Amino acid sequence: MASLNVGNLGEFLREQRRNAKLSLRQLAEAAGVSNPYLSQIERGLRKPSAEILQQLAKALRISAETLYVQAGILDERDRQDLLQVPAAILADPSMNEQQKQALLQIYESFRKENAPQRATAQDAGPTGPAGRAGPADEEPRSPEHEQQAE
């Protein structure tokens, strides 16, 4: 995983906060983090988790991916890949605007729900967390075991 570039992230967050005309205290409250913690992030003293970045993005009404790129968690190419689906939905002439917005909301909710899992799965490697075997690596079950499970 790429290292966090907290200095640039802090500057970027401060700029976004000011553009949104929010005080440090207002953003901290909206994001559900403490005022001192947010201040430390903005000054480059703390490295926020992906979850905290997601909360800050929601409070600032910007995409979490934008903050992930700033923090070095997500590569800019990955971000461009993530933007292709919404662009395709918006360009689809077979749907009306209401349908497009509904589909975008569903897509975004699934992505947010799976965001922590994506990071964990990428960090864990092919065998899963802590080297445990995934479903494809499990031992085959005996027919008796299958019947007992039913």
Image (cartoon, rainbow, N blue to C red):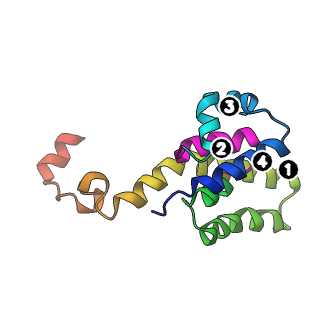
Q: Few, some or many C-alpha atoms within 10 Å of disc 3 (few <14, some 14-19, many ≥20)?
A: many
User: Which residue shows up at 55% across the image and 43% down it?
Assistant: 51
The tag on residue 16 is 4
Label 4 Cα neighbours within 10 Å, binned few <14 / some 14-19 / many ≥20: some
Label 4 vs label 1: CA separation?
A: 29 Å
- The residue beneath circle 2 is 42
User: Which quadrant holds residue 140?
Assistant: bottom left
Mark identifier at residue 65: none
SS class of the residue under badge 1? helix
Quadrant (top left/top right/bottom left/bottom right) for the C terminus: top left
Q: Which residues are magenta?
A: 46-64
Type of amino acid under label 1: Gln
**Residue at 72% from the left image edge and 48% from the top image edge:** 105
For disc 3, the marked residue is 28
Tell me, yes or no, if residue 33 can be seen here. Answer: no
Q: Is the Cβ of the residue at disc 3 closer than 8 Å to that at disc 2? A: no
